[in-house]
Image: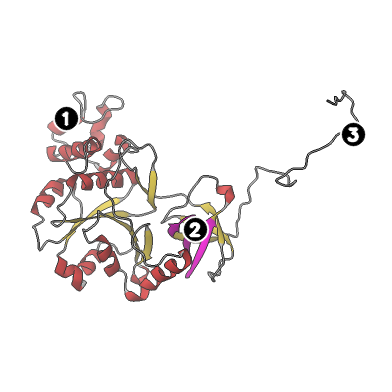
């Protein structure tokens, strides 16, 4: 074994070539001040379809973003080939700060948080009044996720020709949630889309619901024929045939008055990531009463200050019941 002394001759030492190249590394990242602004429309196996001005551009995430992932609804900065032509690929070099996020986990024991949609203004929770039967616990979970993520909820009830909406309206009346009731006939004729559209103009709305409630049928009715070409373009660049809501997809409403984001049908909505202290923000009449609560109060324990707050007449008892029902939904199964 050859040993070298303290004063070795440089020519006498072998150096191994750098297999990854000899380019010097630096922690200074380019600012990409000339990057174009875009919006992520859908994500498919590492390829992101973005809208840049009026062009559909296929892009991939730049390595410099590390593990940070862009999702549907994200506002991003892109560089590279932004022509949108076939076989071109741009790079997403920056993800702008999000105004809201819709998150879920696979179940309440799953620590892995999935961000479904970014920058949506409201969450349209679509539920059938019959066939399939309403699942109030799933609705509760979607409401909690909306309040936690900074989205305003909208309740869309379909198939009113099969069952009246009275029970659901009574259950959620104290939450002051805007709602729309539609029938199958209205859904087929387009009248349902027109009524729902009144709640969507000028906003980004994510639609969520389990299979069979008519969610995707409603979304398709909200997107006129001259705008559905966007769906075809998205399928062409991602290599998919027909969009069947296997991944979230953002579609513009006519007149540039808003966006609709169709999400895959859900069987469960895990809330392992939810912080109860953020849900209270959706109850401005109750939130001041939490000042006297003990630290890390669950708002459903003997020392909770909200009981005294309501007893003093500052808020309706039904509102406190609604809050506690939503907060306790994490401990219940959706089918309960």
Residue pictured at 33% horizontal, 75% vertical: 225
CA distance for labels 1 and 3: 82 Å
**Residue placed most toward the observer, 115 or 175:** 115
Image quarter in which the N terminus is found: top right
Where residue 215 appears, as percent x and y from the top left, is: 25, 60
Of the two numbered discs 1 and 3 in the rendering, the one whose residue sits closer to the viewer: 3
Q: Which residue is mark 3?
A: 12
10 Å crowding of disc 3: few (<14), some (14-19), many (20+): few
Q: What element does badge 3 sit on?
A: helix
Can residue 112 be found in the magenta stretch? no
10 Å crowding of disc 1: few (<14), some (14-19), many (20+): some
Q: Please, which residue is most extreme toward the bottom here?
A: 226
Q: Earlier in the sequence, mark 1 or mark 2?
A: 2
Q: Most prominent secondary structure in the magenta stretch?
A: strand
Q: Which residue is mark 1?
A: 307
Q: Earlier in the sequence, mark 1 or mark 3?
A: 3
Residue pictured at 12% horizontal, 61% vertical: 160
Where residue 71 appears, as percent x and y from the top left, is: 43, 53
Which residue range is magenta in the image? Answer: 42-60
CA distance for labels 2 and 3: 50 Å
Residue 312 seen in render: no
Can residue 46 be found in the magenta stretch? yes
**Residue placed most toward the observer, 334 or 2:** 2
Residue 199 seen in render: yes
Q: Is residue 16 above or below residue 177?
A: above
Q: Is residue 59 above or below residue 175?
A: below
User: Is 154 displayed left or right of 53 in the figure?
Assistant: left
Q: Which residue is mark 2?
A: 47
């Amino acid at each position: 074994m050859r040993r070298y002394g303290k004063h070795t001759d440089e020519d006498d030492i072998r150096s191994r070539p750098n297999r990854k190249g000899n380019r010097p590394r630096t922690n200074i990242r380019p600012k990409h001040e000339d990057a174009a602004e875009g919006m992520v429309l859908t994500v498919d196996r590492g390829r992101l379809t973005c809208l840049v001005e009026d062009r559909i551009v296929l892009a991939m995430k730049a390595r410099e973003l590390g593990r940070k992932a862009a999702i549907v609804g994200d506002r991003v900065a892109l560089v590279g080939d932004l022509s949108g032509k076939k076989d071109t690929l741009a790079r997403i070099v920056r993800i702008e700060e999000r105004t809201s996020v819709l998150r879920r986990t696979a179940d309440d024991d799953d620590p892995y948080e999935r961000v479904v949609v970014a920058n949506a203004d409201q969450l349209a929770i679509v539920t059938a009044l019959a066939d399939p039967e309403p699942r109030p616990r799933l609705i509760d979970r979607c409401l909690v996720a909306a309040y936690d993520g900074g989205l305003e909820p909208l309740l869309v009830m379909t198939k009113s020709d099969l069952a009246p909406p009275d029970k659901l309206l009574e259950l959620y009346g104290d939450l002051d949630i805007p709602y729309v009731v539609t029938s199958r006939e209205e859904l087929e004729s387009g009248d349902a889309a027109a009524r729902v559209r009144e709640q969507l103009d000028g906003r980004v709305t994510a639609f969520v619901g389990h299979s069979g409630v008519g969610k995707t049928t409603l979304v398709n009715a909200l997107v006129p024929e001259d705008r559905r070409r966007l769906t075809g373009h998205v399928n062409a660049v991602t290599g998919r045939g027909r969009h069947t809501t296997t991944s979230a997809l953002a579609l513009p409403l006519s007149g540039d008055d808003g966006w609709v984001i169709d999400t895959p049908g859900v069987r469960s909505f895990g809330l392992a990531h939810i912080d109860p202290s953020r849900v209270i923000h959706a109850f401005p009449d109750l939130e001041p009463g939490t000042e006297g609560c003990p630290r890390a109060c669950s708002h459903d324990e003997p020392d909770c200050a909200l009981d005294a707050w309501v007893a003093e007449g500052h808020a309706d008892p039904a509102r406190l019941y609604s809050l506690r029902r939503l907060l306790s939904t994490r401990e219940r199964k959706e089918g309960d």
